[in-house]
Image (spheres, helix red, strand yellow):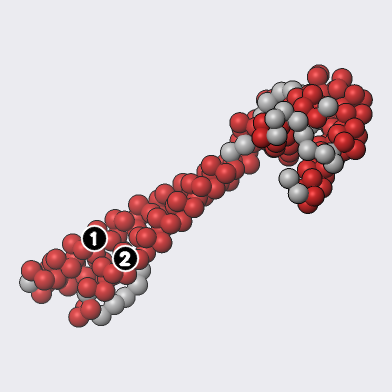
Amino acid sequence: MDLFNIDALSEKIDRCAEDMQQAAKDSALTLDAQIRAYDLLDTILCLKENLGGTLPEGLEEASARYCAVYEDAAPFLETGYDEEALKAEAQKRIQTFKDRLSDARFEAAAAASLHEFAKEVFEIWQTSGIFARRRALRELRERAGFRLESKRIGNYVAKTFDLMNEAQTRFSNAQQAVFSADVSYKIKPGLYEAINKAIV
């Protein structure tokens, strides 16, 4: 590990120590603090695994500061951990992303349906009489919300295909956002104690 990463890890250790102090002062642990503690513990354990059970040099001062703060804050951390409150906050945060996902799913389904209808209209345009063609084209234009010349009916198929792909991309991005926003697995008791044991 290079010096930059050592400095960055030291800052993360110090930040978690500050989180402990604030939690003891407020008698409440925030979700952000919980997430930082989980991530720090994960980083430390990965480092130790890759370095044969030890931490790299350069973390001694930050580790000592953390352990001192932990000793003072430990009584609160044992009694003030509110898992239900943390999980409720996590669900509240992710709900916005779930709402966006629901909207994106609807838009993707509508775009796929429109594309399929455009292909049907194109088939009607090639095989049916003038009244059926006009009726189908009118319905397609109403559903699509944009207008193309009747002699360029094939362009509807291409344009709705592009719209379908764009909607599918937005849906995939919304799915990924939900997965990324789900931090419920990081809500575990004893993280600060585990960090304290891991850095000594």
**Which residue corresponds to the image point at 54% horizontal and 44% vertical from the top-left?**
178
104 horizontally vs 11: left or right: left
Q: Amino acid at mark 2?
A: Thr
For marks 1 and 2 on the same chain, the one whose residue lies earlier in the sequence: 1
Residue 182: give x, y in percent of width and height.
58, 38
Q: Nearer the viewer, residue 18 or 12?
A: 12
x, y (%) of residue 78?
A: 80, 19
Mark 2, other Cα within 10 Å: few <14 / some 14–19 / many ≥20: many
Residue 15 visible at all: no
- Residue 160's mark? 2
Q: Which residue is mark 1?
A: 117
Inspect the image, locate mark 1, and give the three-letter code of the amino acid beneath it. Phe
Query: In this rendering, does residue 130 appear at all?
Result: yes
| Secondary element at image label 1 | helix
In the drawing, does residue 86 fall left or right of residue 200? left
Q: Is mark 1 in CB contact (under 8 Å) with mark 2?
A: yes
Q: Position of residue 107 (x, y in %)?
A: 40, 55
Quadrant in the picture for residue 73: top right
Residue 48 versus residue 126 in the image, above or below = above
Give the quadrant of the N terminus. Answer: top right
Q: Position of residue 56 (x, y in %)?
A: 78, 38
| Residue drawn at 41 percent across, 61 percent down | 166
Distance between mark 1 and mark 2 Cα atoms: 9 Å
User: Is residue 163 positioned above or below 16 on the image?
Assistant: below
